[in-house]
Image (cartoon, grey):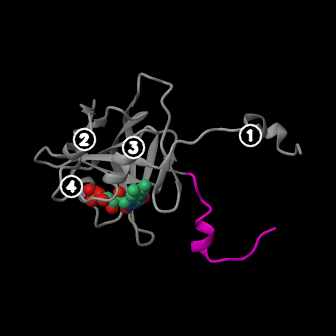
């Protein structure tokens, strides 16, 4: 049974929420990384990502300038790095250097890959929409990479206040749609 409440209260129940790192590089060559939770796949063929990025973020400026970026799925050990990347602006700080985050050269864009991530997607900007107070960035995937260790898992935001953790599937039987009506 549902109880009517405020959107703010109901949103507290949205977790776990995915979190990605968005890597960019400024025209002078310095790379930057930020955390983004408001993200989704926007198209399958061609594959596109949607990112909601505040217009005040350094990343937003760099995406507007360079028209490219990398979406990296952080692994579940990367909570402290993601938290730092998501709570410090890169206008003046070199977050990648502070974090000693290992990067790799991408195949098609100048922004770097995050070496320890579960997967990386190189993207070229398609369009920016402004339906509300947060610009929506649509990027087309032009190259993809996965970590060679297929056993590493993704990091998620598991609760309000940027609580970051891995998640575990507890009961696969109940997740099978054929068992949806089982007691
Ligand atoms: C877990 C997490 C999720 C976040 N999600 C978003 C998001 O979806 N959109 C956004 O604009 N900022 C988000 N932030 C905040 C940005 O990462 C933060 O403003 C960051 O300092 C921007 O970095 P930049 O200025 O170097 O681009 C998030 C932060 C954290 C820790």
Q: Which mark is in front, 2 or 1?
A: 1
* Residue in view at x 45 percent, y 49 percent: 19
Q: Earlier in the sequence, mark 2 or mark 4?
A: 4
Reading the image, the residue beneath label 2 is 111
What segment is highlighted magenta in the picture? 1-16
Tell me where residue 121 sits by quadrant: top left
Write down the quadrant of residue 3 in the picture. Answer: bottom right
Nearest to the observer: residue 166 or residue 52: 166
N-terminal-most mark, 2 or 1: 2
- First of labels 3, 4 by sequence position: 4
Q: In this orientation, does residue 40 appear? A: no
Q: In which quadrant is the C terminus drawn?
A: top right
Q: Which mark is residue 175?
A: 1
Q: Is residue 25 above or below residue 152?
A: below
Q: Quadrant of residue 177?
A: top right
Q: For mark 4, what is the residue?
A: 65
Q: Is label 1 in a helix, a strand or a loop? A: helix
Of the residues under marks 1 and 3, which one precedes in the sequence?
Answer: 3
Asked if labels 4 and 3 touch by Cβ distance under 8 angstroms, the answer is no
Against 58, is 30 above or below? above
Badge 1: residue crowd in 10 Å (few <14, some 14–19, many ≥20): few
Assess disc 4: are there few (<14), some (14-19) or many (≥20) residues with their C-alpha within 10 Å of its C-alpha: few
Q: Residue 97 versus residue 11: which sits nearer the camera? A: 97
Depth check: give the residue in front, 181 or 76: 76
């Amino acid at each position: 049974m549902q109880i009517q409440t405020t959107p703010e209260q109901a949103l507290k129940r949205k977790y776990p929420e995915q979190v990605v790192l968005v890597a960019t590089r400024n025209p002078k060559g310095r790379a930057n990384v930020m955390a983004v939770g408001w993200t989704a796949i926007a198209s399958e063929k061609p594959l596109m990502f949607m990112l909601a990025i505040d217009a005040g973020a350094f990343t937003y400026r760099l995406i507007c300038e360079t028209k490219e970026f990398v979406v990296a799925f952080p692994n579940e050990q990367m909570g402290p790095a993601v938290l730092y990347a998501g709570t410090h602006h890169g206008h003046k700080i070199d977050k990648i250097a502070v974090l000693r985050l290992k990067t790799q050269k991408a195949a098609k864009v100048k922004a770097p890959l995050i070496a320890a991530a579960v997967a990386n997607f190189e993207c070229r900007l398609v369009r920016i929409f402004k339906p509300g107070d947060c610009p929506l960035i649509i990027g087309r995937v032009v190259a993809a990479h996965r970590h060679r260790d297929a056993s590493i898992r993704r990091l998620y935001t598991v609760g309000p206040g940027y609580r970051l953790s891995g998640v575990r599937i507890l009961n696969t039987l109940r997740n099978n749609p054929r068992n949806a009506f089982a007691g």
